[in-house]
């Protein structure tokens, strides 16, 4: 029986692709790509010539049925996004759900994703964490940030370079400017950088240095004990 293969692709460094992913891309009948131009560059690098079709957030509702029919008819299909693992802040969920509903096997390969390297190198606890992806851009954004202010687990956010400073400022307002943060940009790429410190320090850094590249913001979880200790210390100082 044919299958749907979810294939992670490099998030920057083209060497970050598994042998299994390469073999899968070679073996399937066709590839669904978020942007065929981006995937063409990767396939040329790997020496793979395979039919490709666009599958992105603007057409996925209309195409999942046809793709499921093709797999049911015996054609193996690989789904890739521009970078990382499909379905993680990228198209993929709708197609996976459709295949599950139709009784089609879905095989997800392990591989590149930005959130795991970011949380591990942040220095914050990573045995439990809260992955939020991209926060709502407008409606519900402030409410969600307020809800996250008391989240005890390490929090992981994705953000564009154009909104990084604004996002950090909003977090500082809701979480407190002294909450610890690690801002990681350009993971696996030549100019990879991790800026660690308080939210206030991170804001100052990126106001002085123009944000460029892909960003992951990792925020320390709420520590109720530390908060109470700080409040007690402030009360003592007032006295």
Image: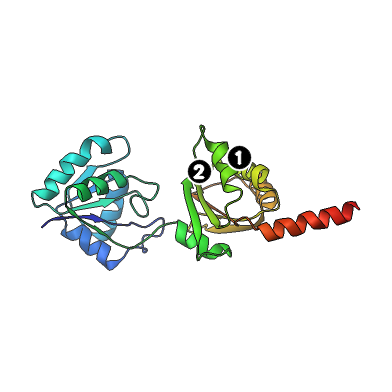
Figure coloring: rainbow
Q: Quadrant of the N terminus?
A: bottom left
Q: Which residue is mark 2?
A: 160
Q: Tell me the residue at 38%/60% (across/down).
A: 112
Q: Examine the rendered structure and indicate whether residue 5 appears above or below residue 159.
A: below
Secondary structure type for disc 1: helix
Question: Quadrant location of residue 144?
Answer: top right
Secondary structure type for disc 2: loop
Residue 208, given in percent of the width and then of the height, sits at: 67, 46
Instruction: Give residue 60's mark.
Output: none
Q: Which residue is mark 1?
A: 166
Give whichever of discs 1 and 2 has the lower sequence position.
2
Q: Tell me the residue at 27%/44% (across/down).
A: 36
Q: Nearer the viewer, residue 15 or 70?
A: 70
Q: Examine the rendered structure and indicate whether residue 210 appears above or below residue 10.
A: above
Q: Nearer the viewer, residue 185 or 198?
A: 198
In this rendering, does residue 136 appear at all?
A: yes
Q: Residue furthest right?
A: 239
Answer few, some or many: residues within 10 Å of disc 1's Cα (few below 14, many 20 plus, some between 14 and 19). Answer: few
Answer few, some or many: residues within 10 Å of disc 2's Cα (few below 14, many 20 plus, some between 14 and 19). Answer: some
Left/right of residue 161 with respect to residue 175 in the rendered view: left
Residue 207, given in percent of the width and then of the height, sits at: 66, 44
Q: Tell me the residue at 89%/51% (across/down).
A: 238
Q: Tell me the residue at 56%/65% (across/down).
A: 125
Q: Residue furthest top?
A: 139
* Cα–Cα gap, marks 1 and 2: 10 Å
Left/right of residue 79 with respect to residue 134 in the rendered view: left
**Label 1 close to label 2 by CB (< 8 Å):** no
In this rendering, does residue 189 appear at all?
A: no
Q: Examine the rendered structure and indicate whether residue 67 appears above or below residue 139.
A: below
Residue 18, given in percent of the width and then of the height, sits at: 31, 66
Residue 166, given in percent of the width and then of the height, sits at: 61, 40
């Amino acid at each position: 029986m044919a299958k749907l293969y979810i294939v992670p692709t490099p998030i920057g460094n083209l060497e970050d692709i598994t042998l299994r992913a390469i073999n899968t891309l070679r073996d399937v009948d066709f590839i669904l790509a978020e942007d065929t131009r981006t995937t063409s560059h990767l396939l040329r690098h790997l020496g793979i010539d395979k039919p490709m079709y666009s599958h992105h957030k603007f057409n996925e509702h209309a195409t999942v049925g046809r793709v499921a029919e093709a797999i049911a008819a015996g054609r193996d299909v690989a789904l890739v996004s521009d970078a990382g693992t499909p379905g993680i802040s990228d198209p993929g969920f709708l197609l996976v759900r459709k295949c599950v509903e139709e009784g089609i096997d879905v095989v997800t390969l392990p591989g590149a994703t930005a959130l795991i390297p970011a949380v591990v190198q942040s220095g914050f606890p990573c045995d439990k964490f809260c992955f939020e992806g991209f926060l709502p851009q407008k409606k519900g954004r402030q409410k969600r940030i307020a809800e996250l202010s008391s989240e005890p687990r390490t929090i992981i956010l994705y953000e564009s370079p154009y909104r990084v400073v604004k996002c950090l400022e909003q977090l500082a307002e809701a979480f407190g400017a002294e909450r610890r943060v690690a801002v990681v940009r350009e993971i696996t790429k030549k100019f990879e950088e991790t800026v660690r410190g308080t939210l206030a320090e991170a804001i100052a850094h990126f106001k002085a240095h123009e944000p460029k590249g892909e960003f992951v913001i990792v925020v320390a979880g709420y520590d109720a004990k530390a908060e109470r200790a700080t409040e007690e210390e402030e009360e003592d100082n007032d006295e």
